[in-house]
Image (spheres, rainbow, N blue to C red):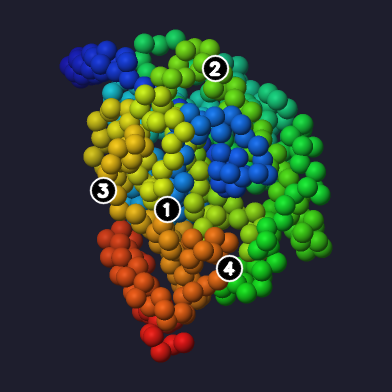
Amino acid sequence: MADNANYIRQSFQDIGRSLSILFTMNSPNLLILHCDQLSSWALSAYEGDEVQTPHIDRLADEGMRLDQFFTNVALCTPSRACFLTGRYPSQTGIYTGIRELGKDQITFAHPLQDAGYRTGYAGKWHLSGQQEQESNWQTAGGFGFEDIRFQWNKGHFKHIEGEAEHEEPKGERHRIGDEHSYGTDWLAERCMEFIDVESEAPFAYMLSFPDPHQPYKAREPYLSQFPPETVRIPSTFAQEDVPDWIARDRETKDFPVQAENRREWNHDREQTLRDVKRNYCAMVKNMDDAVSRILAKLEQKQLLDKTLVVFTTDHGDLMGEHGMTGKNFLYEPAYRIPMILRLPGVIPAGSRCDDMISMIDMHPTFLDLLGVPQSGTATGVSAAPLIRGESQDWNNIVFTHPYGNERVACFTPEWELGFDFHGEPVLFDRINDPDQTNNLYGNPEHAELIATLRQRMDSHYAEYCPRVTQWLPGQKGFDTPKPEMG
C-alpha cells in the first residue's frame, strides 16, 4: 500500500513538473557568475584601470551596472547565505565563516526548480559547515540545485583533476593548473557542458568561482601580464591616522592572511603587497577570459539573449588600503561590490543604477525578473522595477551585520556610520572623502545626522539582529556626540 501511495505521489509530482516545464518553456534562463572576494576597483566595468576586463565590461555595456550594491556581511559564508535566501544572518543562523545552512532555508533555486527550471551549481559552496568528510564535493544536499556534481564546500583550488563521468574531482590549493585544470578554467568548462545539454526547460545555473580569494596564486600567462613594479600601491597604504580598531588589527593579524607571505610581509610590506596584488589582478584577468568563453557558448547555442546573466561576488578585498588586505573591516571597499545584470528586452542596455541595493534583495529580484512566483520567505525587496528602468519607491539605506567580531555600519548615498564593540565609532563622508581618511564622528556639526542614522540603526538591529542592541546603544563612546564636544 505504501509503495502504491509513493507511486501515486511521484506520478502527481511528475505531472506537475511537466506542466511547469510547459508553462516556462519561453521563460528566460538564469546564469549567475559569482566570484569570491572581488573588489570593484579590479574591473574596468567599474572605471578601474588596473585590470582590463572587456568581457565583463560587455555585460555592463549591454545590461545594467549597479553602482551602489552592497553585501550585508563582508565574509564568505554569511554573505552567500544572504544572497541565496534573501535573509539576514539572524534569520539564516549564519553569523560567521564555515557554518551550515539549515535545511529549512529556502533559496531562490527552490521556486525556480518548482517552476520547471533545470537547476545546477558548481564551485565553492561554503555552506555545509565544519564537518570533516572524505570529500569536499557534493555536500549541499540540493537547496533547489539539482546538479551539484561539481560543487564543493571548502577550498580555493588552483588545480582540479577528474570529471564525474570518470572519477570524483580532486582539488589542490597549492599546485597551479593550466588552461584546463586551473580552478577558474575547469569550472568554466563544467558550466559550458551544462549549457550544452539539450532541454525544453529553461535552466538556472550558479557558477561560483573561488577566485580572486587567497591563496593569491595566478597561472601563466596571466601572472606575467602584471609585473610587480607596475602594481599600484593604494594612497592609504601607509596611513597612520586610523581608527583604533584598524590599528589593533594591524598589530594582531598577519598581512596578507596567507602563511607563505608572512615572513616576506614582516621584511618588506610594500614588496609583499606588490606580489600579492599582481596575483590578484592576474586571477581577475583569467576570470574575464573565462567569462568570454561562457558567453561564446551561450551565443553558439543562441541562448545569450534569452538568459539573465548576472556577474557579482560575495564581498571585496581591501588589498592594501589602510594597510590591510582581506575583508572584515568597516571600510567601504569590503562592502560595496560589483553587481552586473544583462537581459535584453528587459534590462536597458548601458544603464546604471545609483540606488542602494543589498545582497538580501537579489533573491526576490531574480524571481521577479524571470517572472517566477516569489518564495514568500525573503526579507529583501525586489529591485526589479529599478533594474528594468521603472520608477520605484526605494529605501536608500543598507545595514551591515556582525561576522563574529562585533562591527556594524549603515550606508546611505552620502554617509557611512560604523561602530566597533571594542573601538571608536566612525562617520565617513562618502561623497567628499571616498578614501575614508577623515573620521567626522566627533565633529559637533554632524550630531543631528548621527542621531538620525543612529535611530535607524537601533530600529533595524532591534528587529533583525537583537544582540547588537545589547552593546550598541550603551557602549562607552558610542553615544551621539553633543554640540559642546568640539
Residue that appears at 63% across and 59% down? 321
- Residue 86: x and y in percent read 34, 44
Q: Are marks 3 and 4 in contact (CB under 8 Å)?
A: no
Local crowd at mark 4 within 10 Å, few (<14), some, or many (≥20)?
A: some
Nearer the observer: mark 3 or 2; the answer is 3
Identify the disc placed on residue 437. Answer: 4
Amino acid on which the number 2 mark rests in the picture: Lys
Q: Which residue is mark 2?
A: 297
Q: Is residue 320 left or right of residue 168?
A: right
Q: Which residue is mark 1?
A: 72
Q: Is residue 272 left or right of residue 302?
A: right
Q: Is residue 306 above or below residue 236?
A: above
SS for dot 4 = loop
Residue that appears at 60% across and 16% down? 166
Q: Which residue is mark 3?
A: 393
Please report whichever mark, 2 or 1, sits nearer to the chain's N-terminal start: 1
Q: Quadrant of residue 369?
A: top left
Most distant residue in the bottom direction:
484
Q: Are marks 4 and 1 in contact (CB under 8 Å)?
A: no
Q: CA distance from mark 3 to mark 1?
A: 21 Å
Q: Nearer the viewer, residue 323 or 178?
A: 323
